[in-house]
Structure formats: C-alpha cells, structure tokens
Amino acid sequence: MILIEAARRILQEIQPCSIRAVCYRLFTQKMIPDMGKKSTGAVGTQLVFARETGLIPWAWIVDETRAAETVASWDNPEQIIETAVAQYRKDYWAMQPRRVEVWSEKGTIRGTVAPILKKYGVTFRVLHGYGSATSIHGIAQETQASEKPMIVYYIGDHDPSGRHMSEVDLPERLHRYGGSASIVRLALDDGDVGADSELPWFPVGDKVNDTRYQWFIKRFGQRCWEVDALPPPVLRARLDSAIATVLDLDAWQHAIKIETAETDSMKNIMGYFKASISRLDPKYSEGQA
C-alpha cells in the first residue's frame, strides 16, 4: 500500500500519463530500485490492483491500446443528428497560414498529450519507431498537395534511434519522396539532457546493438534518456506553448465565432426535424415522452 499511495500522489500531480512515467517518478523518489522490467512490471501489477479496487481512477493512466472498432449505428434519426451537433467542430486550421502536427515514436505519448491535441484539434501520428515507407511517402504527398507549410513537433527518446529518427531519417526520407516539413524536436530536446540534467538517464552502452550507436556517441556522448522521464505536465505545457506561438490568433478566434453560430443553426434544424417527425409518426413523439 505504501507504493500505491506514493503512485496516487504522483498521479494526482501529473495525470494523465503512462505507467512508465509513474515508474520514473517512483525511481527518483527511491521507491523502486531501478527502471528494469522486474521493477516496472511490479509497479504495473500494483497499479492494476489499485484501479480495479477504486484506489486510483482508471482515466489517470493511459496507454496506446486502441479503442474497439465498430460500425456506427443509432436507434433513430434523432440520435445521429444529436451526435453530429455534439461532435461538430470547425476546422480552425483551415484559416491558419500553416499546418501543425505532432509526431512520436511512442504510442504511449498520445494519452499524455491528449488534452492539448484536443484543445487545438492537432493531428497526431505514431510512427512506432522508424515509420514505414508507405506512411512517410503518404505524408510527403500530403505536403505536396497543400500550399501551407507544415510544422511537425516531434516527441521521442534521446537515444541512438530516437535521435536519428528526427535528425536524419525523417528529414531525408521526406525530401527523397518530394515532401517538406519543418521538424522541431519538442522533447526530449537539448535542454532536457546533458551533464546537469536532473532526469534519470541510462548509459548508451545499453544500446550497443543499435546500428546508430556510434553515430549517437560522436554527436551526443554516453548518456541516454527516455521521454517518459520528462514530467507529463512539463511536456503538455511545452506543446501548448509551441502550438500557441505559431497561431494566427485573430483567425483562430474568428473560427470559434463561426463554429458557435453554425452549432446554434444545427440545433435549430434539429428542433424542426423533431417537430416534423412527430407530425409524421405520433408514436415517435409518444416514445420520447
């Protein structure tokens, strides 16, 4: 229970986040001996118990498990209209001078930055390591088809592959396929790593079998960091600030006003629809009583 109470205090501060992010905080507090699979697995088991017994809310911990895919269906026409009204959101980016996306090598980051992605309606891509040729070629084609320049905020580990992806692989392949994007490494960035970093690190020797091992040592030295070590609130605040900085705020606010007016119009149409259906089918009206 001591570990669960410590994890609960951490989650109250940094949720939503991954189990690994909790483990990093527990490690820095010396609640677990290391970040090895045995230690992190034990934490994961304890956090499953804590959520199943109601000690910790399920929503506080996120992972990359995808929701079940189902075919959308409704009990009646009113439901689909209500859903459309509730989910309608103006494409604020249509009025912006540039496009913004967030990319990561890790799917677990999606849940951590979800509040910011939702706030700005930003596209998020999980590359799962080195993105496939098909996916990168598709992105290149998208940039070709758009007149707006694309800014990509990249989130990944500071290790041989993580650095090589954002520094070399992605820019080179986008260029090779005729695409273009400004890739900005949001985290981990140079300010997060280094001799004076307070984040837990591990020796690059742990990655000796990575083909980018020597490339990394020549440029960055002997230490590696996982992006999960960065406190989630810091990552969310950094992403929020980065996106806000590139916005045309006047155009953004104008889009919000248009969205409000359009939503009100949709609600009026829904009222007319209900009245029309009630006249055609009295049983429908009785069923809603």
Image: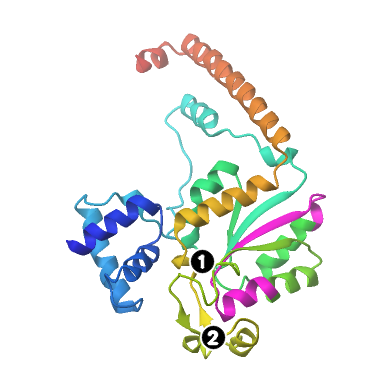
Q: Position of residue 121 (x, y in %)?
A: 60, 44
Q: In terms of depth relative to the viewer, which is nearer, 284 or 183? A: 183
Image quarter of the N terminus: bottom left
Left or right relative to 158: residue 75: left
Q: In terms of depth relative to the viewer, which is nearer, 50 or 265? A: 50
| Residue wearing tag 2 | 222
Is 149 contained in the magenta span? Answer: yes
What range is drawn magenta here?
144-167
Q: In terms of depth relative to the viewer, which is nearer, 159 or 117? A: 159
Residue 227 numbered tag: none
Q: Position of residue 183 (x, y in %)?
A: 70, 63
| Residue wearing tag 1 | 106
Q: CA distance from mark 2 to mark 1?
A: 22 Å
Q: Is residue 119 above or below residue 48?
A: above
Q: Position of residue 29 (x, y in %)?
A: 31, 67
Dot in front, 2 or 1:
2
What amino acid is found at the position of numbered circle 2 in the picture?
A: Gln
Q: In terms of depth relative to the viewer, which is nearer, 32 or 153? A: 32
**Image quadrant in which you'd find residue 74:** top left
Residue drawn at the location 61% of the way across and 85% of the way down: 212
Sequence order check: which comes first, mark 2 or mark 1?
A: 1
